[in-house]
Structures are given as C-alpha cells and as structure tokens.
Image (tube, grey):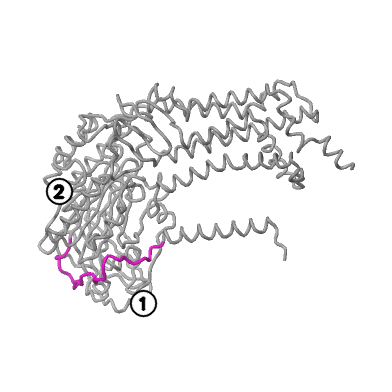
Amino acid sequence: MKISMSTIAFLSFILMLSIFVAKITNLIATDVESNVDTVKPKYYDIDDSPDHLMWFLQISDIHISIFKDYSRITEFKEFCDITVKTIKPVVVLASGDLTDAKTKDAMGSKQSLEEWQHYERVLKETAVTKKTTWLDTRGNHDNFNIISINSPENYYKNYSVQGKKHPRSYLHQISTSNEKFSFIAIDACLEPGPRRPFNFIGFLDHQEINNIKKLAQESRRLNSDYIIWFGHYPTSSILTNDTKSVRNIMGDYREGMVYLCGHYHTLGGTLPEMYTIQHAGFLELELGDWKDNRMYRVAAIDHGQFSFIDAKHGDWPVILITNPKHALYKMPTKENLDSIIKSTHIRVLAFSTAPIKTVKVKINNEAWIYCDHIKGPLYTAKWNATLYKNGLQVIHAQVVDEYGKEKEIMQPFALDKTRLSFKVLSRFILMSNATTVFEVSYIIMVLLNIIPLCVFRLCHKLCELKKIKRPRIRIKIIKWFVKKFWILSTVDRLFYPLIFYAVYLTVGPWAIGEIIDDQIGVVFAWGMFIKDSYLPGSFTYAYGFYQLLSFHMPLTFLLAYMIDRRFEEFEKTSRKSSNIFYIFCINLPFLLLIMMQTSMTYFFWLAYGTLATILCPLRTWSIILALVLWYQVYRLPNHCLRSATFAWSTSRESSVNKK
C-alpha cells in the first residue's frame, strides 16, 4: 500500500502530540507516592483533647507602597493588631514582597527606605512580635536593584524582624508540650538582584542549596516532628544549578508537611485557589496576595493532620475544620488516615473578634450537632466515623458570635481511598518548571519565525532547479498565505534581516546598561552578566517570546503582504493606487506596530535608563530594522522580484496552461 508524505507527516504529528500529552499528564499527576521511605505516618487517638494541636498564620505579597493604596498599610496594621490578637497564632509567616519597591510611574524599581520604615513601624506599634513569633523572608520586590546581600540598599537586613539574624534562608523551631515544629524559610532571591522585569524567577546556587540542606538536617537533629517549609517563590519558579531541585530536597524529609508560598498573586485573581500535592507527597499552597485581595491563611497541624483555610481580611468568623480534614488535601505519605477513621470527635477551630456564641456541625443532610468548647478556639462534637467510611461525604460547620456575625462553611471528606483532583491549571503552574516552559515557548517562537521562511526559500530554489513543480494550490486561503511568504523568502534584502534578527535574539546581547544602579550589565536570552556575577536565563525567555510574538511575527506578516502587492504591481496585475486614504489604510497596521514597539521601548527606558535603551537591539534597534525593511519594500528595485516570477508569474502560468 502506498503511503503519501502527508499521511506520514500527519502520523508523525499525532505521535509527537501523544508523547507531549503523556509527559504533561505525568508531570501534573498527583497520585505519585513518595519514595522517601516506607515508614507509616504516626497514628494519633483523635478525641476532644486540646493536645497535639498547633495553629499559625501566613501573609504574603504585602507590597507596602508610598505611592499606591495607603490602605495596604493601615489594614496591614489591623491585621498585626486585631487579627493576630484574635487568632493567637504561635507563628506568623510573612512570605515575601514585604514592600513594593516601585517608582511612582510603576515602571522603574528600586528599594524605598520609607516603605521599609513603614513596615518596621507597623510591627513595632502593634507590638506583634510580643504576641507571636514573626517569621519574615524576602521576595523579588524586596530584592530589586540590590547588588549584594551586604549592600546598604538591602533594607531587609535592618528593617525586618528576621533579617538582622538571618539574611537568607533560616530555621526556626517551635516546641509545644507534645511536638516540635520546624519552620524553614527558603530565600531564593537573585544575587545580584536586577531591577524589574528580569527579577521574576528565583535562583538557588550551590551555596544556598547546601545551606537549605543543612537547615533540614538540623531540624532532624533537633528531633522535629514536622517541617513547614515556606518562601516567596513557588517551587516552579525556583531555578537551581544543583543536581537536585528544591522539590527533591523537600521530598527527602518525611517530616516535611507543606510548602507555603506566594508570588503568583493567584494569576491576577483568575486562579484564587492555587494548590497541589507534589510528587514527593507534600502539599504546595500558593497564597493570594495582601496587596489587592487582602488575603491571609490560617493553618493548623492537629494530631498529625495538616489543615488550612484562606480568609479575607475583616471577614469574621473564621472557621477551620481539622477533623475530618478536607478530602482534597489528604497526604497519604504524611498523614495516617487511620487516625481519622478511628477518631471519636469532630474538631473545629473557630475565631472571631467577638466571643463565640455557638458552633455546630452536621454531616451531609443530617441534623445539626452543637459543639462543646474545649479550650481556646477548639470546639468538638462526638461522631461515629464508621458511618461514613465509604465514598465522599460533606461536613458543614456554622459559627455565630455574640455580635450576631454568622459564617457557615462546608468541605468534603473521605475515610477511604476516594480522592479529589486539584485544578489542572493549578497543578501545571505549581508542578512544572517555569524556566523550562519559558525556554521551550521561546524556542518554538524562534523556530516559527525562521523555519517557514527557510522552507519556502528552499522550495523556491528547488523549483528553479526544476526539482519540484511550481506550486499549484487550489484552496484560496492557503494559496493566499503561501504565495505571500514564498515571495518574501525570495527577496534577499528582506529575508536575511528577518532571519538574522530572530537568530541574533537567541545568541547576541539584548541590552547593555545599568541593570542595577551604577552597575553595567549585559542581558542575553540565556542569562545576564552583572558585575562579576552570572544569572542564568529564566524570565528573559518569556520576554523574548513576547517580543517575537508581538513584534517580529506581525512585522513578517505585514512585509509579506506588502511585498505581494509590489509583486502584483511588477506583474501589472493590479494598478498602484494614488488615493491618499488608501495609502494611509495600507500603512496603518505598520504604524500601529511601530507605535506599540515605541511604547515598549519607552517602558524599557523607564526600567533601565538611557544607556540600556540606546544599546538595546531587543527594543530600540528593532524599530530601526522595521523602518528600514518597510522602506525597502517601497524602494525595492524590480530585478529583486524577478526570481519570484519563476514560481508565481501569472503570465508564465498562462503559457504553461496553454501547453
């Protein structure tokens, strides 16, 4: 049986697509068992005892600003005063981006002493460090425009709580009467820290990786029962030059329950619940930002079970059901399900600014059961867990305080192996590697800008050598595209600059200038050189992808369209219009493209200054290239179009048809 080339190409595409889908499916699978060890998690008798219970808070992406939204500061003060006083956590985790560090126009970036003073003042005026243990760490905004950790502009060292003792990653252990809890902060900030936007992905070098390993080993030496990892960057946005990723390191410790982070701002509110369970068996939970959404997290470890609820500032009461725990967040390798199955009491933590009046629970559509107050925020009610051992169930909890504020929540639970699935987008964002995604996207975009033109040029050469026949395409829309790009590929004055620019962005410097104040740096797609340091490429790939997608590719399309018009005029199949309005309309898309690129160049100037804008092939020089190529289209000599007539001349096609 004869198989056509199109069939082979189609089958190859299906095979590649299947492999790609299989890899993505394996990447985001959440049912992978941890291979740390086979030791079964500790069993607890869960009753109405207040023992074996610890709860804490997390707040992230505060972005204290002296230019935008002063209520961030005033409401942050309320959080440190009222919320902390009400919930009484043993620890508060402030996971980065404590300050905004943007200029007034929001395009430039540098550390602001006044913002850090606001942060320090709020903590002192509320005396929050006397009410609880405040564990803060840096985010990328806290690291903008800082040449080194010992720089005078690194205000985190002097104005944060932990920076004075712990300039980077650190360990803090909390002991209760029954357990020991280690909180390990992971500081993945770049050193040196460039100005935005090239400061989005975190990086851990060998030294910091070894430091984190030592902290984890120290927690084990101190006989910690549980490790709570926290940091600003999600693991997907932490690049390492070590053989082990930060996820692998966390996965090596069975005590590690969860990694808490921020940074993604719930994708601008489109993904408010960005959670997953990593292959190593621990939860990774991104917290919505304080900046715009005023979110914070209440988390607890109750009899070996980790539970949490994300709450909005000022929304009281706050309810956290710790037993039975939410079915979505079960960690089979970290928690003993038998503890829940054999438990005798439902356990609820209830918080409000007014004394709690009633707490009641119900399962599925059964009657409400009033809970007994045990101690602090803990309320319990007896239950028979064996009645709910099969399938997915739903528990409701309702809290009313003495001011009449009422809140009701519900959550699913399962006492068998029934599992719920995290959102696919959440899993992909948190379980992938952002740098790899950016890099692959960039490479694909480069190839899309190079390969089609090269293929058309090769086909034209073969056509001239009579190795293949002239293109005869019956489908009009396909012929419309193919003809334009084919003709463009035959014009050396347009073809070579377009190909060279796409290749240049991959290998050559994009900009040379002050990436950090008073420090000349060189930016490439694959990394940055600042002073004596090299930072591997990460977000630069996303930046390059956007440049090719939003400018280079549209420019190629516009040039292909215009060169086809010139070819038709050359062939005298259409008359050149002298109508001014028509000429304006023809050139309008190009003018809009230049205006957009000019605005992007202006933003680049605001971010990195004059020198970096002048020595900037990525932005400034691309405008010059586009103008030169557009001029070439209009002033192109006729002899440059003769080669295209061999394949697309209508007169030649007519003579061939007559024969």
Q: Residue 26's x, y, as percent?
A: 43, 61
Q: Residue 387's x, y, as percent?
A: 31, 79
User: Which label's residue is closer to the chain start, 1 or 2?
Assistant: 2
**Residue 79 against residue 362 in the figure, above or below:** above
Q: In which quarter of the image is the N terminus?
A: bottom right
Q: Quarter-wise, where is residue 106 in the image?
A: top left
Residue closer to the observer: 401 or 204: 204
Q: In this view, does 493 lie to the left or right of 262?
A: right
Task: Kindly state the secondary structure of the residue where label 2 is placed.
Answer: strand
Image mark for residue 390: 1
Q: In which quarter of the image is the C terminus?
A: top right
State the residue at coordinates (44%, 54%): 425
Residue under label 2: 133
Which secondary structure is most common in the magenta stretch?
loop
State the residue at coordinates (26%, 77%): 384
Q: Residue 363's x, y, as percent?
A: 32, 71
Task: Kindly state the secondary structure of the residue where label 1 is placed.
Answer: loop
Identify which amino acid the numbered label 1 is placed on: Asn
Q: Residue 622's x, y, as percent?
A: 52, 28
**Residue 300 against residue 593 in the figure, above or below:** below
Magenta-drawn segment? 29-53
Furthest residue toward left = 177
Identify which amino acid the numbered label 2 is placed on: Thr
Q: Which class describes the residues within 10 Å of circle 2: few (<14), some (14-19), or many (20+)?
A: some
